[in-house]
């Protein structure tokens, strides 16, 4: 039981550290996003994800660009829409 707790805490620390890195490789991107390696390669092949390939072989991903890519096409919640409508009505 105690070993499981230690492993769980180590996993959380590792994920936190990935969040601090600016450049990620494929394995780190898998950990960061929760995507499978094959899905990441598919996204790269289809040109749907921002990446860099400086030597023509190894893939690298800029975390800030990945964050922006993950958050693209976001939708507002109902409460955000209501708040925006309230503020707009108050202005007029």
Image (cartoon, helix red, strand yellow):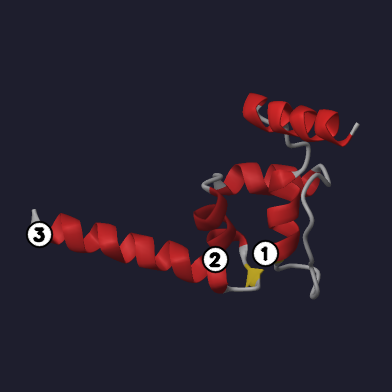
- Residue to which mark 2 is pinned: 19
> Element at badge 1?
helix
Q: Residue at x 72, y 31 (%)?
A: 75
- Residue to which mark 3 is pinned: 2
Do residues under tags 1 and 2 come within 8 Å of each other at their CB atoms?
yes
Q: Residue 12: x and y, percent? A: 36, 61
> Element at badge 3?
helix
Q: From what the image shows, is residue 13 above or below residue 92? A: below
Structural distance between the alpha carbons of marks 1 and 2:
8 Å
Q: Residue at x 13, y 60 (%)?
A: 3
Crowding at dot 2, Cα within 10 Å, few <14 / some 14-19 / many 20+, comes out as some
- Residue to which mark 1 is pinned: 63
Question: For the C terminus, which image quadrant?
Answer: top right
- Residue 41 marker: none
Q: Residue 85: x and y, percent? A: 78, 28
Decide if residue 62 is in sight here: no
Structural distance between the alpha carbons of marks 1 and 3:
33 Å
- Classify residue 86 by image quadrant: top right
Crowding at dot 3, Cα within 10 Å, few <14 / some 14-19 / many 20+, comes out as few
> Element at badge 2?
helix
Decide if residue 27 is in sight here: yes
Front position in the image: 27 or 20: 20
Q: Residue 58: x and y, percent? A: 70, 68
Structural distance between the alpha carbons of marks 3 and 2:
26 Å
Crowding at dot 1, Cα within 10 Å, few <14 / some 14-19 / many 20+, comes out as many
Name which of mark 1 and mark 3 comes first in the sequence. Answer: 3
Front position in the image: 6 or 83: 83
Q: From what the image shows, is residue 34 above or below residue 53? A: above
Do residues under tags 1 and 3 come within 8 Å of each other at their CB atoms?
no
Front position in the image: 2 or 44: 2
Q: Residue 36: x and y, percent? A: 54, 45
Left or right: 60 with respect to 26? right
């Amino acid at each position: 039981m105690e070993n499981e707790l230690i492993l769980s805490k180590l996993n959380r620390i590792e994920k936190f550290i990935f969040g601090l890195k600016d450049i990620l490789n494929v394995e780190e991107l898998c950990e960061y996003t929760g995507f499978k390696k094959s899905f990441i390669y598919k996204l790269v092949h289809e040109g749907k994800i921002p990446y860099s390939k400086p030597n023509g072989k190894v893939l690298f991903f800029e975390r800030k660009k990945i964050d922006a890519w993950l958050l693209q096409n976001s939708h507002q919640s109902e409460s955000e829409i209501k708040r925006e409508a309230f503020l707009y009505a108050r202005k007029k």
